[in-house]
Image: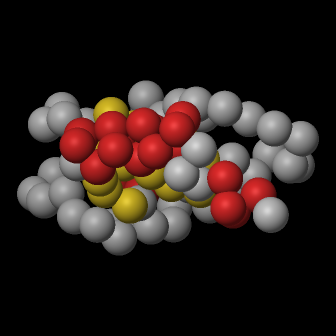
Amino acid sequence: MDRIYNGMPAKHLGTEGWRKPWSGGNGGSCVEVLPLGDGRVAVRQSDDPDGPALIYSHCEIERFIRGVKSGAADFLLV
């Protein structure tokens, strides 16, 4: 693979190693993540595995998770 970039087809990152950090009763439509060798994390929609992958730095993922844990995203549930 030449270059990993935001929005690239997720299938170009391979089919192995994708994981669902959580799954709910939503009919199988989940977020899947793939840790990349350089510390970044790819995110894709499980019901569209050939669709685009969003690529986040380790720091971005860490800030997101810490924010969710602290309640910063609770407004999305209203």
Q: In this rendering, does residue 33 appear at all?
A: no
- Asked if residue 53 is positioned above or below residue 40 in the image, the reply reads below
- Asked if residue 71 is positioned above or below residue 52 in the image, the reply reads above
Q: How is the image coloured?
A: secondary structure
Q: Position of residue 8 (x, y in %)?
A: 33, 67
Give the number of callouts: 0
Side of 59 where 61 appears, left or right: right
- Asked if residue 15 is positioned above or below residue 56 in the image, the reply reads above
Q: In this rendering, does residue 30 appear at all?
A: yes
**Split into 4 quadrants, where in the image is the C terminus?**
bottom right
Q: Position of residue 67 (x, y in %)?
A: 46, 45
Side of 33 where 58 appears, left or right: left
Q: Nearer the viewer, residue 4 or 40?
A: 40
Residue at image coords 44%, 67%:
52
Q: Position of residue 21 (x, y in %)?
A: 58, 31
Residue at image coords 54%, 35%:
69
Side of 78 where 72 appears, left or right: left
**Image quadrant in which you'd find residue 62:** top left
Q: Nearer the viewer, residue 35 or 50?
A: 35
- Asked if residue 47 is positioned above or below residue 51 in the image, the reply reads above
Residue at image coords 54%, 51%:
72
Residue at image coords 59%, 44%:
71
